[in-house]
């Protein structure tokens, strides 16, 4: 039924991993396997035991001490790689800067000196609310150097979100900027920060990076300009060796309640996980590759695959401040051409936009440097996968569809680019060393092909160690549904070949007249029609069938909506998936509701489809159109 694409022959012939021996090594002795991976880091004190405790209480590399910043910077400079570029920073408004490992180490030490003077000590939490400027990874690494934890808050979040996160974590210092550039406009980060700190706040000091030059209020005794506070001359600030289980960072992520969870990641296990997966999944060659993970560092993808994974491997990355369509729709391809990007890692939602805008924007640039393409964040529909592979990758680049979560720390499932054949839309197989299993509703592993729940059976190095300040929520959210297993809410299918397809969050799996249908499947069917640019599908309650399928569709530029097209699309889905999967209603909309990280907000679409009150829509990138859509949905019901 599904399309199978073996690794492109040229790629496979040169790939660093060409067989499954790593998987076999991990299966034979998982602990020894991870211990060997951990030893590719530099430990100030070697660890005594690889792992202790169960899933809810795992401790990795026990007794070991290391420093994440040392592993990302000093050891590379000591090895003679000081002149290698760590980041090609591509800022908005033609700002560009290439930063070597030696320069990065120097700036990290100077900022660490400042943080130390402000009283930051091991175990403290520092909030960071910055645009995608070099000072962002520098600030993170400066915290790590001192053994302090960072809590990066995405620059698109509001003052209220920032305040909640700062209060929850008890951050004593905030690093922000006068503003950030976005699509030619300016985001008032400092104004937001002032609002977030008004009244009672644990924050004692604020460092402000000058980015836009906008006029901002500086509060005496609290606020200092980064460029004035940070010494101009080099300073030697030693990297403090910390326990392997020392908190490296908090990253807040949405759960089922209104209060975001502070996901906790620690040092040795996390760094081992992201360093290893960066090598495996991307076939990384640190001396020749130019790696571009086009996420924002405010999300876990940026933490793991812009900062810690690439830097731990002494790779050269692109650090991109902009957006895909500013100043033009060829922005990505211009950047790929400028730096000779070899590996591109981006989200399906971006790929669908590129597809909608048309291949001429890609064709206008030389993107032949690309040799591998990756996706992350949501299920990718096969049409977008094929377009990515053929148009962006020219048919010669493998596409890796990587499944993982804020909670997993790093990648868990993906085809290995030189080993596994890929199936468009399929995350395929666990990477070596991860005990991923699909189980039924009783927690029993599926004996053969079928649909179930994605779980993880054994602790893994990069797993979250807790929810900050809420151990009960940690246990309830992840370990109560299937005792003895980690479960983070995704449904999965095992196909005839034993490959794993992510069906989306379990609350996205519909049940229509006793048939289980994934929202992703129907979306993919809709998007495979030439008129459709993007589609989101939700289940809504229906008297006769239990659930009915409600679709929200954006059209490609040249197509008109109308009753004819609605009927055509229903017929099309019926043809692709079977009559049971035909949407009952299709609403055409110029835009879909998305979080600021680009994920379609199905919860909101379900509310619209069910005619429920919309509640708080402030985390949406495009809140305005929701009211209009809910009125039309009511009319269609
Ligand atoms: C990295 C990231 C996690 C959720 C996860 C899934 C979905 C992520 C894929 C995917 C299908 C993929 N972290 N998801 N990757 N679904 N295929 N390759 O996105 O914490 O923000 O989100 O994203 O539902 O549970 S996250």
Image (cartoon, rainbow, N blue to C red):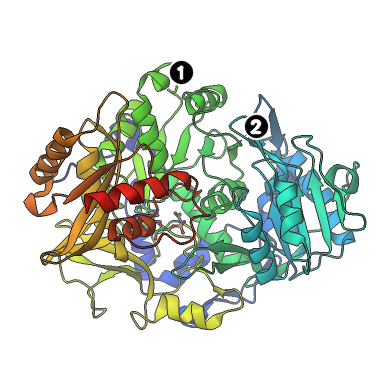
Mark positioned earlier in the residue sequence (1 or 2): 2
Q: Residue 400 lies in what quarter of the image?
A: top left
Report if the CB atoms under discs 1 and 2 are less than 8 Å apart. no
Q: Which residue is drawn at 25% across and 50% down?
A: 635
Would you say 184 lies left or right of 122 here? Answer: left
**What number is the disc on residue 91?**
2
177 relative to 545, above or below: above
The image shows residue 574 at horizontal and vertical percentages of: 9, 46
The x, y position of residue 541, in whole percent, is: 21, 65
Residue 523's place in the image compared with 211, above or below, is below
Q: How crowded is mark 1: few (under 14 residues within 10 Å), some or many (20 or more)?
A: some
- Which is more toward the observer, 74 or 59? 59
Q: Where is residue 536 in the image (x, y as percent from the top left)?
A: 30, 48
Residue at (53% x, 54% y) in the render = 618
Residue of label 1 = 365
Say whether residue 525 is visible. yes
Count of numbered tags: 2
Considering the numbered disc 2 on the image, is that residue within a helix, a strand or a loop? loop
Q: Is residue 168 left or right of residue 449?
A: right
Q: Which of 69 and 117 is in front in this view?
A: 117
Q: Give residue 504's position: percent from left, percent from top.
A: 31, 58
């Amino acid at each position: 039924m599904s399309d199978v694409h073996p690794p492109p022959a040229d790629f496979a012939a040169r790939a660093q991993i060409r067989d499954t021996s790593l998987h076999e090594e991990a299966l034979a002795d998982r602990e020894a396997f991870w211990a060997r991976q951990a030893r590719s880091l530099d430990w100030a004190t070697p660890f005594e035991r690889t792992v202790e405790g169960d899933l809810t209480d795992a401790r990795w590399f026990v007794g070991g001490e290391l420093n994440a910043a040392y592993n990302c910077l000093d050891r590379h400079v000591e090895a003679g790689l000081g002149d290698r570029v760590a980041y090609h920073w591509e800022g908005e408004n033609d700002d560009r800067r290439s930063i070597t490992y030696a320069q990065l180490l120097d700036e990290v030490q100077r900022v660490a000196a400042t943080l130390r003077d402000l009283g930051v000590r091991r175990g403290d939490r520092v909030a960071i609310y910055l645009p995608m400027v070099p000072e962002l990874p520098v600030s993170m690494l400066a915290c790590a150097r001192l053994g302090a934890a960072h809590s990066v808050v995405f620059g698109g979040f509001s003052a209220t979100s920032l305040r909640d996160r700062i209060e929850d974590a008890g951050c004593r210092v905030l690093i922000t900027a006068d503003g950030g550039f976005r699509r030619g406009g300016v985001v008032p980060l400092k104004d937001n920060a002032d609002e977030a700190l008004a009244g009672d706040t644990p924050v004692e000091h604020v460092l402000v990076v000058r980015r836009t030059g906008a006029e901002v209020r500086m509060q005496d005794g609290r606020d200092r300009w980064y460029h004035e506070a940070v010494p101009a001359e080099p300073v030697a600030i030693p990297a403090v060796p910390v326990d392997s289980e020392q908190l490296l960072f908090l990253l807040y992520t949405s759960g089922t309640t209104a209060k975001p969870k502070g996901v906790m990641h620690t040092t040795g296990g996390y760094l081992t996980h992201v360093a290893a997966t960066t090598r495996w999944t991307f076939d990384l060659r640190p001396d020749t590759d130019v790696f571009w993970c086009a996420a924002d560092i405010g999300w876990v993808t940026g933490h793991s695959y812009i900062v810690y994974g690439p830097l731990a491997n002494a790779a050269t990355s692109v650090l991109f401040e902009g957006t895909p369509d500013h100043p033009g729709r060829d922005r990505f391809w211009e950047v790929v051409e400028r730096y000779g990007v070899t590996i591109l890692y981006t989200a399906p939602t971006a790929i669908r936009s590129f597809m909608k805008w048309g291949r001429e924007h890609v064709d206008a640039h030389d993107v032949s440097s690309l040799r591998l393409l990756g996706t992350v964040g949501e299920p990718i529909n096969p049409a977008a996968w094929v377009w990515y592979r053929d148009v962006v990758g020219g048919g010669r680049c493998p596409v890796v569809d990587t499944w993982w979560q804020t909670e997993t720390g790093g990648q868990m499932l993906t085809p290995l680019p030189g080993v596994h054949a890929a199936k468009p839309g399929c995350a395929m197989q666990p990477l070596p060393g991860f005990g991923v299993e699909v189980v039924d509703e009783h927690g029993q592993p599926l004996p053969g092909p079928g649909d179930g729940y994605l779980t993880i059976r054994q602790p893994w190095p990069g797993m979250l160690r807790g929810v900050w300040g809420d151990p009960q929520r940690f246990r309830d959210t992840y370990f109560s549904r299937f005792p003895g297993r980690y479960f983070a809410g995704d449904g999965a299918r095992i196909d005839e070949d034993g490959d794993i397809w992510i069906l989306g969050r379990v609350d996205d799996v519909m049940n229509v007249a006793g048939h289980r249908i994934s929202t992703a499947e129907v979306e993919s069917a809709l998007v495979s029609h030439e008129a459709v640019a993007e589609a989101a599908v939700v289940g809504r309650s229906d008297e006769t069938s239990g659930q009915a399928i409600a679709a929200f569709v954006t059209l490609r530029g040249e197509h008109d909506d109308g009753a004819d097209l609605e009927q055509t699309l229903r017929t099309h889905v019926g043809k692709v998936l079977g009559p049971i999967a035909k949407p009952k209603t299709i609403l055409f909309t110029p835009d879909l509701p998305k979080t600021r990280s680009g994920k379609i907000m199905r919860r909101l679409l379900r509310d619209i489809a069910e005619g429920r009150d919309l509640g708080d829509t402030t985390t949406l990138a495009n809140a305005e159109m929701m009211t209009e859509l809910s009125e039309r949905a009511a009319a269609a019901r």
